[in-house]
Amino acid sequence: MRRAGLVVWGAHQLARSLVRPGITTQEIDEKIDAFYQERDAIPLFRGVPHPSPGKPAFPAVCCMSVNDEVVHGIPSSRVLNEGDVVSIDTGARVGGWCGDSAVTYPVGRIADDVQRLLDCTSGVLQLAIELMGKRSRWSDVATEMASYVRDQGFSVVENFVGHGIGRNMHEDPQVPNFSTPQYRRNHDFSLEPGLVIAVEPMVNMGSKKVRGLADYWTQSTVDGKPSAHFEHTIAITESGPVVLTGAPVDGESLE
Ligand code: MG
Ligand code: MG
């Protein structure tokens, strides 16, 4: 799974180098598609069936969600402008195993409050990774994640959650970024070596509520305020959590 994670990390380094005012989300998607092809990595998002029968499958290798778009945005001829933020979510299968990671990138200079939203969202993912080595149940991690976000005046999106990941991108269990008594009773899971999950907080500046757009895929905030999304694929090992979609360490190489 680390091999897949490293390729997805590499795709994000490419994305980071491409995001700037004037580029379209489609152009970034095409470059990441080529990056995967060169490495015999199979993109996981293209062709994902729509949850509702008869609706179109997802057409691209990345989800690109701009500003008030939360997740599942479709790359297009939309041009990125100074001050935008773009959430890029992408996954690939390498050697039969999957990696999945998302980052919200600033386009040029962004407003201070939007930067705080990005910092809060990457910060709450980092908090979750640390807590995964210190708590025994996911609900304990999720409860602290929700408090962290609330304390900064933002809101956790509840309509979408993280997931188990392995041979397939979406496996059990579901991994919410908040907890409820009902969740704790019926769906909670223990954090043990061998578990691999994709943790992916989505945080809104305003209301937590989202709505679907007419393209059948894109989800945006109901109030038009910005949203951010950070995700890593994380394994729990005997020596603690390991970020499988993180940067190379100890002589690891992408090639
Ligand atoms: Mg993802
Ligand atoms: Mg995911």
Image (cartoon, rainbow, N blue to C red):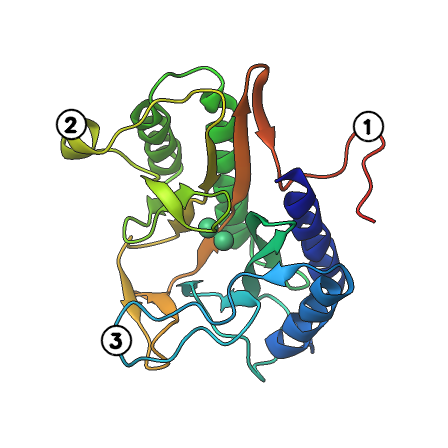
Residue occupying the point 56% across, 62% down:
85
Q: Position of residue 249 (x, y in %)?
A: 77, 31
Towards the viewer: 83 or 235: 235
Q: Position of residue 94 (x, y in %)?
A: 65, 51
Whether 171 is drawn above or below 83: the answer is above
Towards the viewer: 96 or 214: 96
Residue 247 lies in quadrant:
top right
In the current view of this chain or complex, which residue is farthest to the front? 96
Whether 153 is drawn above or below 136: the answer is below
Does label 1 or label 3 sit earlier along the sequence? 3
Which three-letter amino acid code belongs to the residue tagged 1?
Asp
**Residue 95 shown left or right of residue 234 in the figure:** right
The residue where tag 3 is placed is 53
Q: Is the residue at mark 2 in contact range of ligand 2, meaning its CB lies under 8 Å from it?
A: no
**Residue 232 shown left or right of residue 107 in the figure:** left
Q: Position of residue 199 (x, y in %)?
A: 45, 40
Q: Position of residue 206 (x, y in %)?
A: 33, 54
Towards the viewer: 174 or 96: 96
Image quadrant containing the N terminus: top right
Which three-letter amino acid code belongs to the residue tagged 3?
Pro
The residue where tag 1 is placed is 250
Let me know if residue 186 appears in the view.
yes
Which three-letter amino acid code belongs to the residue tagged 2?
Arg
